[in-house]
Amino acid sequence: MDIEGTYTLQAAPQEVWACLLDRQTLQRTIPGIEELERLGEDTYAFTMHIKHAPLRGWYSGQVDVIEREYPFSYRVMIESEGQPAKLHSEWTVELRAHDGNTVVVYKGTLHLTKAAVLLPVPLVKGTIKVLIQQFFTALADHLRTASLSYRGTVEDTLAPSEFNQVNYGRIVVSSSAIPGYERLAVRK
């Protein structure tokens, strides 16, 4: 079964790329992930608990990241085994800059084993789409939190008038004259 879609994140492609390939970020944003262990340069082992029918259950498997083209695209192959299904999937992820944001385009193919063929395909596809939406929502929150944290650091540590643009041009830092000290104003 084929699954594809897009999601727009309010961050530069380089920031999104870094998050999509960061083990700690993925551990916080993938729904149901219990463990994500790096086995090699581009290989990870995982354990996850899916709470949505018809895929409800525990799964473990391996993810291989292949064909990286920084910061524009990469492919992943996922093998997992669990109850009620054994799954194999291949995904292509593309990052496209658009008006200061990043459009993530994903395309995947999910293969079910013979034992899992009895699962209703529309429900399986719907469950995968729900999990993808939950992941991107969590990733957007993570990026927003990281940006706010960065902004706080900028406000607290930069001397006034030192920078005109920060964080890929999304935050403009300007100074305003106040007797005895200048205040930083951050505008989006």
Image (cartoon, rainbow, N blue to C red):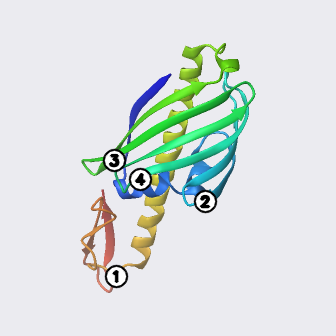
- Callouts 4 and 1 close, C-beta under 8 Å: no
Residue type at the position of mark 2: Gly
Residue 110: image location, x then y, percent: 54, 28
In the rendered structure, find residue 33 and report the number of the disc placed on it. none
Position of 113 compared to 125: left or right? right
Query: Which residue sits furthest bottom?
Result: 180
The answer for how far apart the CA atoms under marks 1 and 2 are is 42 Å
The answer for how far apart the CA atoms under marks 4 and 1 are is 38 Å
20 lies above or below 166: above
Residue appearing at x 53%, y 41% in the figure: 77
- Callouts 3 and 4 close, C-beta under 8 Å: no
Report the residue marked by disc 1.
159
Residue 43: image location, x then y, percent: 59, 53
Report the residue marked by disc 2.
40
As rendered, which of 187 and 147 lies closer to the eye?
A: 147
Q: Residues within 10 Å of mark 2 (few under 14, many from 20)?
A: few
Which-is-in-front pick, marks 4 and 1? 4
- Callouts 2 and 3 close, C-beta under 8 Å: no
Query: Which residue sits furthest front?
Result: 114
Residue appearing at x 44%, y 66% in the figure: 150
Residue type at the position of mark 1: Ala
Residue type at the position of mark 4: Arg
Residue type at the position of mark 3: Thr
Residue appearing at x 50%, y 47% in the figure: 139
